[in-house]
Image: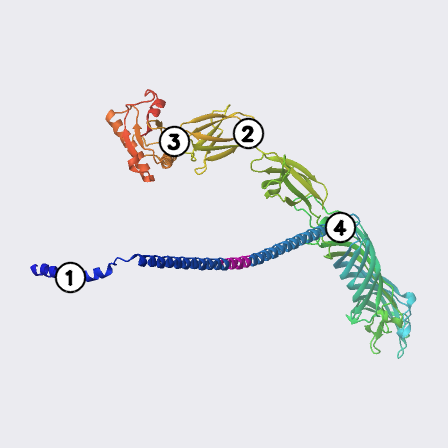
Amino acid sequence: MKNIFRNILIASVVLSLNCAPIVAYAMPEPAPAAQNDKAKAAAQKKKEAEKRKKEAEKAKAQREKQKAAEAKKREADKKKAAAAKENAKKQAERDKAAAERAKAAEERAEAQAKKEAEQKAKEEKAIRDYEKYQERLENPRTEVISYFNLGLRLGYAAMMDKINGSYMGAGTLNQSNALQQLKGGPGVGLDVTYNLEYGHFLFETGLDFRFLNSTSAYGFQATRLDRTYGATYTYLFDNLRETRNMLEIGIPVMFGAQFSRYYFLLGAKVHYGLPMGYSHKGQYDITVDDPAYIDPYGMGIFDLNGQTNQKMVFRQPDVSVAAEIGLDLDEWLQAQPDKKAKKAKVKPGERLPFGRQNIHYRVALFAEYGVLNTNGTPKANPVDFDAKAVEVKNSNTLLAMNGDTKLNNLFVGAKFAIQFEVPGKKERPVPPPPAYAIYSVVDSETNQPLEKALIETRATESGKIAMREKQITPKGLRQKHALGNFTVDVKAENYYPATQTFDIEEVGTTEYVTIAMRHRPVLRVRVTNKETGLAVPATVQILRADVADPAYNLATDSATGATKQMLEEGPKYSLHITQMGYDTLDMAIANIGDSLNIQLVPVKKGEVFIVRNLFFATNKTRILSRSEEALNDLYMYLARNPQVRIKIVGHTDSVGKDEANQKLSDGRANEVMKDLIERGISADRLQAEGRGETQPIDTNDTEEGRQNNRRVEIEIQ
């Protein structure tokens, strides 16, 4: 350490000796006067040079500043020009967008106008079509109705022959002794035809099948000469029956008319016969006139060995004139329009619409007579003999005698037919064009359309809904409607309900229905804190002078403190406002359309108020759930007034022991404080105290008084 101090001291001395000449050299020596003037002049010159230099620098700075200003101005002008160009571009874009919007609006307007024109043209066409349809209903055209018929005919058939000729000797018939009796027989026919009905006119054609069976009885005498012995044989046929069958297919062509349920048809039928046969049945006597004997003698009665189902030949065609007269059975057999109306009958001649009622029934009497000779049988003897035998060998149809025997057919009887109606192209009914009602709702004072309203329409007489509730805008509402009288009910916020009736008398018309609504006064109430001006969520009761209970219970908005209510005109009203932590307010309402700004006075420090609608379990500290509203109001009061501190005081009635009541009041006050803390109120703002039964506010002799004494109070600290 000593060496360090010593070294520092030596270094200091050396430095002081070395610095002395330098200091002396730096100090100026005294100068003479001339030198002083020269020095002054030099200093002045230097000063002026420095001044000029500064001025030059200043001028340079000024020039640079001016140059910078000019550059800045040029830049600003450039930016301004660019901004102007950009603005012009934006303006052009805005103009273009505006033009596009205008064009789009014009196109929309044109499209709307076109749509409205098309709709109007469509409605006008619907009206014209309906008027034409109504005219056709009033002056209906004659309808063409087609039917397919299936008919069955049963009756009497006869083949009427006209025998002409004689048979004498070995091959002759003595006509003078011939007898003929027409018996006839059954006939059956089947029709498959088409029937056309045009007004009263009828036409029928198709296919006709018929089977005819006819029997004729003949009696005649024939003689035969035996040339070998000279004997003459006489044959007496007294009951020869010839049965003929004929099956024909034909085409009827019939014309007629129908009046109500009755109809008739006249015309002709062209038939073609199919190969059928004939058969004989009978007996004959033989008498012999032999020259060897004095008197003729008989050989007895013999059965005719006649022909059975032998072929007959017919001339084609068989043309018959035909007639048919009958009636429709729809009146009795047709399906009824209404099953429930069992007594309802189809009117005479009525045809029900196509469906299961398209089957119709007919019954008729008919007659058909062949006007042409249908006999085509080749000429032949009615009976043939064997030369070596006495008996008749065989017999032929008598239609073959002489080859010119005429045959005419007859068929009469009854017919039953089923008709299948062919549904023609029915004209679709043209529905009546809809009528429209155009609704508009306006303010009765300003006559301006309402922004929004609810509208419903019903039939005035029946009350049936014609238009369910819809919202109507200022543009109005267009609605289809049937004909009739209607009542429209309209509701709108802040307006009295309105009702109006209107008529729609003709289809295709438009009825303009304008409903004027009277503005309804609205009472508006805003509740604030008088000291802070903040909104107060409060319960607002509106009382009627003639009614004990509140007419309306309102709650103000927690953010704005406002509420509103429409009141009926006539009664007098008053306000009753209560809110925890504020003085109660009562005031009369002068005008039901007023806007009231109510300022509630907050409770001051030291003041006490009771927490209403706070409920506990009997003789317990548990808070019941129906106390939620009261607890929330107390919490909101403390949350909106953070500077307020309170003491929660519990009270009981006098029932029970003092110690138990004291403990119960302590517990209830603490439960309330605990609930507020759980809701977010700081614990240092709350106190809880129980005072048992020591501070009653009412008598303990009645239940009502004891209920008032069981309370929780809030003391502002």
Residue picked out by circle 1: 17
Q: CA distance from mark 4 to mark 3?
A: 74 Å
Instruction: Report whether residue 341 is seen.
Output: no
Q: Are marks 4 and 3 in contact (CB under 8 Å)?
A: no
Foreground mark, 3 or 1, reads 1
Badge 3 amino acid: Met
Judge depth for marks 4 and 3 and give the one in front: 3
Label 3 and label 1: CA atoms lie apart by 96 Å
- Residue assigned mark 2: 568
At numbered mark 3, what does the secondary structure look like: helix, strand or loop? loop
Q: Which residues are magenta?
A: 72-83
Point out residue 544 in the picture as x, y percentages from the top left corner. Answer: 50, 26
The residue lying at 60 percent from left, 38 percent from top is 490
Q: Tell whether 163 sits left or right of 250.
A: right
Q: Give the residue pinned by disc 4.
A: 128
Q: Residues within 10 Å of mark 2 (few under 14, many from 20)?
A: few
Q: Is residue 18 left or right of residue 326?
A: left
Cα distance between the residues tagged 1 and 4:
139 Å
Side (left or right) of 632 relative to 15: right
Q: Are marks 2 and 3 in contact (CB under 8 Å)?
A: no
CA gap between label 2 and label 3 equals 30 Å
466 to 385, vertically: above or below = above
Q: Earlier in the sequence, mark 4 or mark 2?
A: 4
Q: Nearer the viewer, mark 1 or mark 4?
A: 1
